[in-house]
Image (cartoon, rainbow, N blue to C red):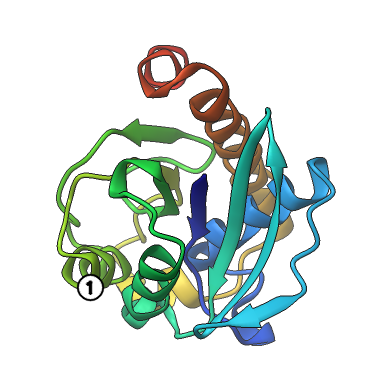
């Protein structure tokens, strides 16, 4: 079983922001595999289903980004999921919009949501898919960049990254992380 988690912020005001790329990837997976995200537990919205013959839980923590790990660790422990069977999807300012990167494990970098995940599950040894959102311009502060409004042209680029991330997760489940990294990195 895989626990596939998209990081984001739960309120509608944050929906179409750069910081919610993880939520959008989960929505894309749910749509493609007809998995209903209509259940609530452990401060998360989730759905159970099958992707490429594997049981999955798609999860969108509702704890706000900086506390994402609190929800994730509850699912991990309840379903007895090992870190290597967790895939965390989140935004990354070090990648341009439309780009993605897959990593087998690693640190949180400057991402507070990932810091929470690593701290709560007490491990860095889980796959992650980073979705590029680009760096803010000099006139823009980081916080406003990640949670601020996005124009339609940039939104199209961000959606390209969302779709690539969805496909990369499917590849990880189907063929393993090495093949997915070779294809998408």
- Is 1 displayed left or right of 128 in the figure? right
Please name whichever residue, 85 or 93, is drawn nearer the observer in this view of the structure: 85
Please name whichever residue, 100 or 167, is drawn nearer the observer in this view of the structure: 167
- In the displayed structure, 182 sits above or below 124; it is above
Please name whichever residue, 69 or 113, is drawn nearer the observer in this view of the structure: 69
- In the displayed structure, 82 sits above or below 67; it is above
- In the displayed structure, 25 sits above or below 38; it is above
Q: Position of residue 80 (x, y in %)?
A: 38, 59
- In the displayed structure, 90 sits above or below 32; it is below
Check the picture and name the quadrant holding the C terminus. top left
Instruction: Assign a secondary structure to mark 1.
Output: helix
Residue at label 1?
Answer: 120
Residue beneath the point at 48% across and 76% down? 147
Residue beneath the point at 49% across and 58% down? 5
Residue beneath the point at 63% across and 54% down? 26
Q: Position of residue 167 (x, y in %)?
A: 62, 30
Q: How many marks?
A: 1
Q: Position of residue 78 (x, y in %)?
A: 43, 70
Residue beneath the point at 19% across and 57% down? 108
The quarter holding residue 95 reads top left
Q: Position of residue 49 (x, y in %)?
A: 72, 49
- Is 48 displayed left or right of 6 in the figure? right
Residue 128 in sight here: no
The quarter holding residue 120 reads bottom left
Residue 2 in sight here: yes
CA neighbours of label 1 inside 10 A, class few (<14), some (14 to 19), many (20+): some
Please name whichever residue, 117 or 74, is drawn nearer the observer in this view of the structure: 74
């Amino acid at each position: 079983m895989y626990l596939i988690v998209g990081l984001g912020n739960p309120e509608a005001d944050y929906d179409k922001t750069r910081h919610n790329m993880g939520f959008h990837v989960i929505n894309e997976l749910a749509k493609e595999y007809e998995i209903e995200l209509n259940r609530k537990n452990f401060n998360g919205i989730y759905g159970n289903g099958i992707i490429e013959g594997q049981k999955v839980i798609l999860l969108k923590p509702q704890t706000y980004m900086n506390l994402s790990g609190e929800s994730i660790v509850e699912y991990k422990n309840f379903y007895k999921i090992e870190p290597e069977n967790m895939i965390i999807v989140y935004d990354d300012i070090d990648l341009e919009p439309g780009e993605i990167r897959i990593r087998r494990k690693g640190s949180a970098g400057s991402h507070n949501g990932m810091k929470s995940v690593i701290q709560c599950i007490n491990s860095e040894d889980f796959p992650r898919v980073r979705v590029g959102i680009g760096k803010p311009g000099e006139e823009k502060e980081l916080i406003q960049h990640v949670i601020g409004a996005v124009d339609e042209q940039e939104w199209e680029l961000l959606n390209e990254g969302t779709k690539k991330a969805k496909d990369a997760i499917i590849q990880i489940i189907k063929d393993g992380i090495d093949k997915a990294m070779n294809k998408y990195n």
